[in-house]
Image (cartoon, coloured by chain):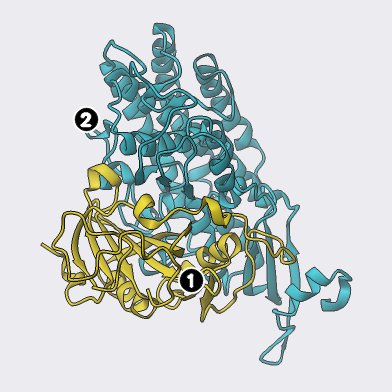
Chain colours: A cyan, B yellow
Amino acid sequence: MKESSESREFSNEYSDFSADVEGEQTLVINMGPQHPSTHGVLRVVLVLDGEYIVSATPVIGYLHRMHEKMAEIRTSVQYMPNMGRVDYLNPLGWNWAYVGALERLAGIEVPERAEFIRVITGELNRISSHLVWFGAYILDLGAFTPIMYAFEDREKILDLLQPISGSRLTYSFFRPGGVARDVTGSFLKDTLAFVKYMRGRLPMYRDLVTDNIIFRKRCEGVGVLSLEMCQRYGATGPVIRGSNRPYDIRKAEPYSIYDRFDYHIPVDEKGDAMGRYRVRMAELAESLNIIEQAVNQIPEGAHLVKKAPKPRWKAPKGEVYFAVEGARGKIGVYLISNGDKHPYRVKLRSPGFSNLSLFGELAKGHLLQDAVSILGSLDLVIPEIDR
Amino acid sequence: MTPVWMEGLETLCKCRHSFEKTGITWGLFLSPESLSGAVKRLYNADFFLEDISGLDSANGLVAVYHLSAYSSPDRVALYVIAPQDDPQIPSISAVYSGARWHERETSDFFGIQFTGHPDPKPLLLPEEMTDHPLVKEEKSRLSLSDLLDRGEIVERAPDFLHFEVTDSPAPESEPVGQGPKTPDGES
C-alpha cells in the first residue's frame, strides 16, 4: 500500500504514516482530493484499523491562490473583487471584513442607509450560504432530496441580490464608505416577501430532515467537540456555538448596527455534529428576524459616503484589524498600510482554516463513515481555507 | 490599568492601542524566549489564537500573533522579531494546537522556522518550492516604525530602538535617529 505511488512527493508523505500501529495491521486510504464529500479539493489521509480511524490528516493547498500576495500588487480599493473569490458562498462576509478594515483605518463614517443595506444583504448571504451547506451536508450523508429544496430557496436569494450587486455568486458589492448601489423599493418589498416565504419553509425542513431518524443516527453523538479543544484550535462560528459557547462577533466585537436589532445567538450544549447542525438551522430563523427588522427600519439617505475612496486612493499609514461574523465563523482582516496606494501587507484570517485544523484530533477513534459526517458538520469551503 | 495576565510579563515594548481605531487593545513586542510564557498566560486568561501572520520589514522578519478574548472586545497582538538571514522563533503549538497550521503557513510565506514544531512541512505551497512569496525585496522593505502603530508606549526595554521615542519618557539612549536600521538578532 505504501509503495504503490511512484512519485517522490507522495512517498515522502506516506512515510509519516506507520503501516503498523502497535502490532495492528492498518490501512492508509486517501479521501480526496477528488471526493464528492470534500466539496472542492481537500485531501484527507486516513489511517484505518478495520473501520476505525487511527489518524486523519487533512492535506490542503490544492486551491491556494495567494490572495495575500495579490493584495500587495493591487491598490487597496482594487483588491475588493478578490474578497468575493476567497469564499464563494459567503462573499459579503469577506466584503464586509475588508471594507471594515479600510474604514477603521481611515476613519470613514458609513451612511446609515448603507449600514442597513449591508445588514440586509449580509444576512441574506448568510442564509444562502447555510442553505448550500444544509443541502450538501444531507447529500453527503446519502439523502438526495433536501438539496433540491435548499437550492430552490437559495435561488430566490440569488435573484434578490443579482439586480443590486450585478452578480449571482462572487459579489463585490460593498465599498469603503458604503455599498456600490442603492437598493430599490421593490428589492425591500421582495425581501419581506422572501422572509415570509422562508419562514414557511423552515418547519418543512424540520419535519423532513431534523426529525429524520436516519439522519439523526448519523449525527447524534458523532464528533463531540469540547470547548477546551475549540480554544486550542481557535474554532469559531457555528462550530464553537455548537459546543455551547455563545461566541458571535456581532455581539462580542460589535460592528456596524447590529446592536439595534433584537435577536439572539443560538447555541447547543451537545457539541456533536447534530449540535452544529441545530445551531445553523436556528441561525436561519434568526437571520430572517434581523432582515425583517432592518427592512422595516431602513432610513432614506445616501448609500455611499460623498468622498468615497477611488481606485487610486491612498490609505493612511497604520495597522488595523477588523473582524466580522461570517457564515462559517470569525473572518478577520489584518491590514498594514504605509500610506501608499497598495497595502504593505494584508493577512486574511479564515474561519474554515481553524475549524478544519481540529479535524485530525476530532476524527480519531471514529468510524470511517463518521468522518464524512464530521467534515460536513464543520461547513468547509476549501477556497476559503486555502485562500 | 494593565490586565492581570500581563503583570510581571517581560516584554521589549508594551503598547496600548485604542480598539476603536485599530481593532487591537495591546501590542507586545517579545523576545523569542519570552514568547511561550506570554502565550501560556493568555491561554489561561481564556484567549484563543486567531491567526499567526508574518511581516517582512527592514528590521527583520516579524511573526505577528493575534489572540482574542471570548467575553469582551479585546485583541492582543504579539510581535516577535527575527533576523532575515536566520529567522528562528519557537513554536507555540504545545499551547495552542491550532498554531501548527498557522506556523506552517507562515513558514511557507516568509521562511520563518518555528523551532520545536512537531511537523514542519509546507502546508499551502508545494514541498519542492524554495521561494517564500511574501518576502520583499531589500529596497522595498520599510522599517517597523513606518509600519506599525506604536499607540501609547507603556513600557520599553532600553535596547528596543525600533520606535524612536517621540512622546513617551525617553530613556538615556543616545539619539541615533536613523541608527537601528540593521536587522539585529538580539531583539
Q: Kindly identify the amino acid type of the residue bearing the numbered disc 1.
A: Pro
Residue at image position (37%, 81%) is: B33
Element marked by disc 1: loop
Question: Left of A333 or right of it: where is B116?
Answer: right
Q: CA distance from mark 1 to mark 2?
A: 48 Å
Name the residue carrying label 2. Answer: A260
Q: Position of residue A66 (x, y in %)?
A: 61, 48
Mark nearer the viewer, 1 or 2 = 1
Q: Tell which residue pokes out farthest to the top in this image.
A: A185
Q: A359 or B181, which lies in front?
A: B181
Question: Left of B57 or right of it: where is A269?
Answer: left
Tell me the number on the disc at residue A84.
none
The reply to whether residue B164 is in sight is yes
Residue at image position (27%, 21%) is: A112
Q: B51 or A124, which lies in front?
A: B51
Residue at image position (62%, 55%) is: B133
Q: Chain of mark 1?
A: B
The quarter of the picture where residue A147 lies is top right
**Same-chain status of marks 1 and 2:** no
Q: A301 or A224, which lies in front?
A: A301
- State the quadrant of the N terminus of chain A: bottom right
Please tell me whether residue A102 is drawn above or below residue A377 in the rendered image. above
Name the residue carrying label 1. Answer: B83
Q: Position of residue A373 (x, y in %)?
A: 58, 56
Element marked by disc 2: helix
Q: Chain of mark 2?
A: A
Please tell me whether residue B159 is drawn above or below residue A301 in the rendered image. below
